Amino acid sequence: MRVLILGSGGREHALAWAIAASPACDALFAAPGNPGIAAHARCVPVSPNDSAGVIDFCRREAIDLVVVGPEAPLAAGIVDALAEAGIKAFGPTRAAAQLEASKHFTKTLCQEAGIATARFATFHDASAAKAYAGDHPLPVVIKADGLAAGKGVIIAATRAEAAAAIDAMLGGSFGEAGASIVIEEFLEGEEASFFALCDGETAVPLATAQDHKRAHDGDTGPNTGGMGAYSPAPVMTQALVDETMARIIAPTLSAMATRGTPFRGILYAGLMITDEGPKLIEYNCRFGDPEAQVLLVRLQSDLLAAIVAAVEGRLSETVLQWSPKAALTVVYAANGYPAAPEKGSVIEGVEAAGSLEDVIVFHAGTARDPEGRLIAEGGRVLNVTALGDTIDSAQRRAYQAVGAIHWPGGFYRRDIGWRAIARGL
């Protein structure tokens, strides 16, 4: 099978690493890829957001399957365009991708399907939004309705912060993503990431994971796309997994099918584990980043075979096997991230880090300069990932690998996995 992966981040490197290991993969391409992905796939200068360019490449290279990594092409309808061209693709259609592309869409679906989530209201007008927030218990959560690269959420602790967030979002700080906003109650509890592989009717749960959104140690600083993750997530007991599948994932699949927009792909539920049980914070419609990195290194089944089963509606036949080991990834980000990451600094020691036992360094925002040196080209630049018998041992191994990398232009959190380790795991 000839496979094309769309994307250039750490998630896509993990996908390339896993798919390249499948005996069914005859040739692997990535558009546009990155220097790490180039070790597993042929990288081609095609934008994931250029549907015509992607289709042209698929026809020239006789691509059998396209695996879409990031959310933007999904929201723009790349899967629809590929289907119209007769090319199989893994990911939801544009209509189904509204589960991620519109907070309002998902909240409304939850109301209709009886899925537990935070109480909310949607606004286009700043005055009305401020009046609502002014009477709302604090803290209050302000969200851009559309895609904002994981940064369109502000938890306001004061009325002034809420008003400022409303003005910023509706004033254009997130572009079209903030043309409307969702204001919702703040949920108390512990967050967890939950993933299910879906074929429109059947959902197969993946292993659990937990990420760290804040930029700095102790869960301080601004929200980011994710500064690290680990798997499994001890907070997600088997009972909670079963409850999430029955009360959140299954009703979502049923509601989407009833609407005539069946969901196929990865359904990623951001959960808050509250005293009343799991509640949905929001959905993403693709593998998480950096959660994919810790999930895929633990997956013992053939990822490509599972993806094909989802595309072809055969997931009822699929059982996934997982390593009993734990995995932990540390995101090494460029100085200035998430506001204004500094680009161009040279990174050394990645090969040495990756040569350590049970360590894989996934590239995210990397590039090569004219001299062939590895340089920073994005915000989140490297995902230093390790396996261990426990989360504690995986953490120690990951930070040992981080220590082998010489990059004065980057920073990382030093406490990834702290919740699990505090539980003695």
Image: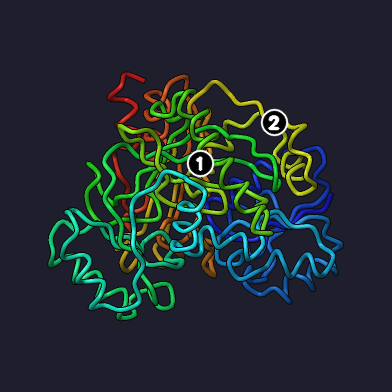
Mark 2 Cα shell of 10 Å, populated few (<14), some (14-19), many (≥20): some
Label 1 environment density (alpha carbons within 10 Å; few <14, some 14–19, many ≥20): many
What's under tag 1, amino acid-wise? Ile
Number of marks in the rendered image: 2
Q: Position of residue 378 (x, y in %)?
A: 44, 63
Between 347 and 22, the one nearer to me in the picture:
22
Q: Is residue 118 left or right of residue 105?
A: left
Look at the picture and state if 68 lies above or below 308.
below
Q: Check disc 1 and report its element: helix, strand or loop.
A: helix
Q: Residue at x 30, y 79 (%)?
A: 125
In the rendered image, the vertical position of residue 268 relative to residue 337, given as above or below: above
Q: Is residue 424 above or below residue 348?
A: above
- What's the image's color scheme? rainbow
Q: Which residue is mark 1?
A: 248
| Mark with earlier residue (1, 2) | 1
> Which residue, given by chain and number where applicable, does mark 2 sit on?
301
- Residue in view at x 54 percent, y 34 percent: 246
Left or right, 19 with respect to 269, comes to: right
Q: Position of residue 338 (x, y in %)?
A: 33, 62
Residue 350: horizontal and vertical position, in percent? Answer: 48, 46
Three-letter amino acid code at disc 2?
Answer: Ser
- Could you say which is closer to the camera, residue 408 or residue 363? 363
Residue 216 percent across, percent down from the top left: 25, 48
Seen from the viewer's position, the closer of residues 380 and 78 is: 78
Q: Separation of disc 1 and disc 2 at Cα?
A: 25 Å
